[in-house]
Amino acid sequence: MNLNQITVPSLDVEKATAFYKLLGLKLIVDALPRYVRFECPDGESTFSIHKVDTLPKDSGVSIYFEDDNLDTLVDHLKAKGIIFKSEPEDKSWLWREAHLNDPDGNHIILFHAGTNRKNPPWRIG
């Protein structure tokens, strides 16, 4: 089994589309104002946004995008006006993470984990 796609809700799909384009995702389906889908710049996963009238409460959604050059990516995005909740930081679980929100408040984590993503020292056999 392979994770194919994640879809998030949005009150304003056009505004969210502009934000995710700034992050570097490539628009592949444009059904504005109700739906869009992107390809990630690396890998095979896709990411989509669909129009809702009301955002879910306390959904607990966190979206992770990995990049081998996290600090450079964050600097590049900040230069484009993206605001981060936290700067890149080394975590105790051996990932380096920076946190931000999209225009609808969805939690985004840009990170680099390398081999520790699937093979941390504490991985079970």
Image (tube, rainbow, N blue to C red):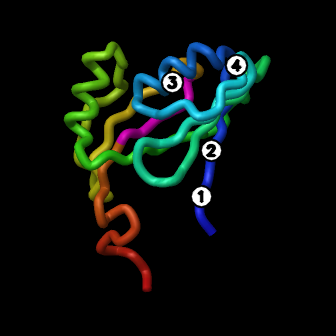
Does dot 3 land on a helix, a strand or a loop? loop
Counting residues from the start of the chain, the first of labels 1 and 3 encountered is: 1
Q: Which residues are magenta?
A: 105-110
The answer for how far apart the CA atoms under marks 2 and 3 are is 14 Å
- For disc 3, the marked residue is 102
Mark 2 / mark 3, whichever is N-terminal = 2
Task: Find disc 4 in the rendering and name its residue.
Answer: 32
Question: Which secondary structure, mark 4?
Answer: loop
User: At x 51% / y 24%, what residue is drawn?
Assistant: 102
Mark nearer the viewer, 2 or 4? 4
Q: Which mark is residue 124?
A: none
Instruction: Give the spatial CA distance, label 2 vs label 4.
Output: 18 Å
Which quadrant of the structure image shows residue 36?
Answer: top right
Magenta part, dominant SS: strand
**Separation (CA) of disc 1 from disc 2:** 8 Å
Which residue was labeled with disc 2?
6
Residue 3 is marked as: 1
Is residue 66 magenta-colored? no
In screen coordinates, is 73 left or right of 24? left
Q: Amino acid at mark 3?
A: Asp
